[in-house]
Image: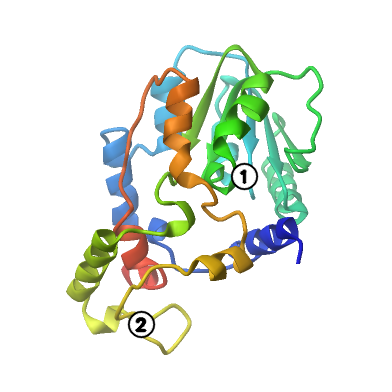
Amino acid sequence: LKGSKRTVSAFNESAKSSANWWDIPYVRERWNKKISGNATKDHNSFLVEDILKGQKNLCVLSLGSGESTHEMKLAKSSIFKNITCLDLSDYRMTEARKTADNKGIKNMEFICANIYEHDFGATKYDYVLFNASLHHFDEIKSFIPQKIIPILKENGGLIMNEYVGATRLQFDKEQIKAVNKALKIVPKKYKKRFKTKLYKNNFSGSGVWRMIMADPSECVDSKMIMPTLHQYFNTQIEKPYGGNILANALKDIAHHFY
């Protein structure tokens, strides 16, 4: 029943096959256009080739990295001296370590730990990276200044690719209305839910208690991410790329559009 154990369980379960909007090629192309301006250049390439261009020997900490697929793509670039991945799930860190070894990646390390308890000692990083993980951290307003800023070098920064919408996915009526309007456009044969005989004909939002029981960390304080980052950091670049409608309309039916 411990919250952190339910979170780990949810992370491990999410590693299994599912049907989410980010798997759709056209969605990814749309993201790329909004982020880099180029349908074939994703956010990792944009980060390395445009944002961090000219920098070298970077030491990066990725928090909540899961199986660390994004970090492995970054590690291929010579600008990174070391990428440290830290995650609560031992299963996902073990899998990530195996994959990195199989690929011959030498500039990465993997730590299974809880950041609230982990001692970084005197270690400082050029950048702290969040890839769809910051929205799993609670009390953002204190988490950033107390846990993140102290482990950054003097001119260090934060990089994130995140959900920054409504806390606990408690969307307002207009957003839910827009999702259902989008669903009406989808032909019935494409509404069949992934690995079921059920059809997705309506979206009513997410129940708070169901979310808490399934994963207490899911979008636990997400609405405070942007206000807090704007308070403590000078924004160098910010690229909103949508998702408030598509993510909900396409969840569990995305496999029809691969």
- The residue depicted at 71 percent of the width and 59 percent of the height is 3
Asked whether residue 75 is in view, the answer is no
**Residue 82 versus residue 217 in the image, above or below:** above
- The residue depicted at 55 percent of the width and 56 percent of the height is 218
- To which quarter of the image does residue 187 belong? bottom left
Front residue of 206 and 104: 206
Which quadrant of the figure contains the N terminus? bottom right
Q: Secondary structure at mark 1?
A: loop
Q: Amino acid at mark 2?
A: Lys
Percent from the top left, x then y, of residue 177? Answer: 23, 66
Left of 23 or right of it: where is 74?
Answer: right
Left of 202 or right of it: where is 130?
Answer: right
Q: CA distance from mark 1 to mark 2?
A: 31 Å
Q: Secondary structure at mark 2?
A: loop
Percent from the top left, x then y, of residue 143? Answer: 62, 34
Percent from the top left, x then y, of residue 102? Answer: 71, 46
Left of 234 or right of it: where is 86?
Answer: right
Percent from the top left, x then y, of residue 11? Answer: 64, 59
- To which quarter of the image does residue 249 belong? bottom left
Left of 189 or right of it: where is 8?
Answer: right
Residue 94 has which mark?
none
Asked whether residue 41 is in view, the answer is yes
**Residue 100 versus residue 122 in the image, above or below:** below
Mark 1, residue position? 68
Q: Amino acid at mark 1?
A: Ser
**Residue 108 versus residue 198 in the image, above or below:** above
Which quadrant of the figure contains the C terminus? bottom left
- The residue depicted at 30 percent of the width and 78 percent of the height is 202
Mark 2, residue position? 192
Front residue of 181 and 177: 177
Q: Earlier in the sequence, mark 1 or mark 2?
A: 1
